[in-house]
Amino acid sequence: MINSVLSKNIDNQLLINQLEGHLNQRKDYLLKELFLQKSFNQFNRHYQDFKEKYKDAKWSIKPHKNDQNESLLDIKIISTREINDQIYNLSTKQTVKVETYKNKIKGYEVIDEESILNSQKSPLIIKIISPNKVLAGEKYEMNLIIENPLDNSLTASGMIVLRNEDKKKISNDIFGIKPNQSGGLFKYIQAPLKPGSQTISAIITHPKGIYLITKKIKVGL
């Protein structure tokens, strides 16, 4: 039994290494071999959309927990993107639960996620204070603190709970952006009454740059 579990963990580690390698080397034609068909279709829809926006992504995939048929992975992605002639840096951290069958990915779920998109030369340095997991119905804080002193230019900010992530775009109307002199963005948020997840998006703008964060928080019992 011990040898069987050890062998399975080695197989899972090999699968993780192959996934990281194929993503970094842009070997898209080999990615399909790592998934069962249904899970690949799910992955490929999101991956192709991501690749259209971020063409130079660098991936780091490390095991957080590695069981016989299920793994928790720590995934980090860095990239850049051009929007309206401006260059933005992307930094994403995810915890992903992966289920395997016969050395292939049978299914996966993003447990928590934090993505930051900011102007390449922005002077904004933001400290994020928020939980990764909350209880159903809990009221919790999501705080973004501007750490480095800025000049006298006003910042503006806004924060929303995303209910339909795929259709949201950055705009003043969606975020309800307002002038801000408090040194950051501070808000209490009500978690949904049912277990699952909640995604929060916030933006801080400054004449010299923009800082956008999207964070997925696990909601449990």
Image (cartoon, grey):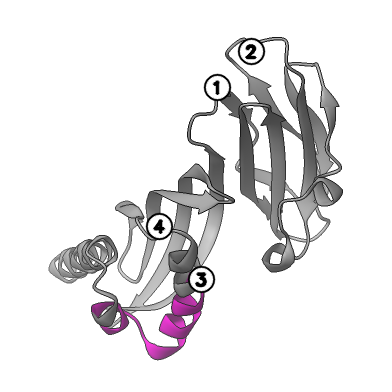
Residue 3: image x %, image y %? 13, 67
Q: Earlier in the sequence, mark 2 or mark 4?
A: 4
Which residue is farthest bottom? 37
Q: Earlier in the sequence, mark 3 or mark 1?
A: 3
Task: Please state if 49 lies on the left or on the right of 106 as rendered.
Answer: right
Of badges 2 and 4, the one in the foreground is 2
Q: Earlier in the sequence, mark 4 or mark 1?
A: 4
Q: Earlier in the sequence, mark 4 or mark 3?
A: 3
- How packed mark 2 is, by other alpha carbons closer than 10 Å (few <14, some 14-19, many 20 or more), is some
Q: Earlier in the sequence, mark 1 or mark 2?
A: 1
Which mark identifies residue 123?
A: 1
Residue under pointer 4: 72
Over which residues does the magenta segment extend?
Answer: 30-46
Magenta segment, principal secondary structure? Answer: helix
Of helix, strand and loop, which one carries label 4?
strand
Residue under pointer 3: 49
Which mark identifies residue 163?
A: none
Of badges 4 and 3, the one in the foreground is 3
Q: Is residue 136 visible?
A: no
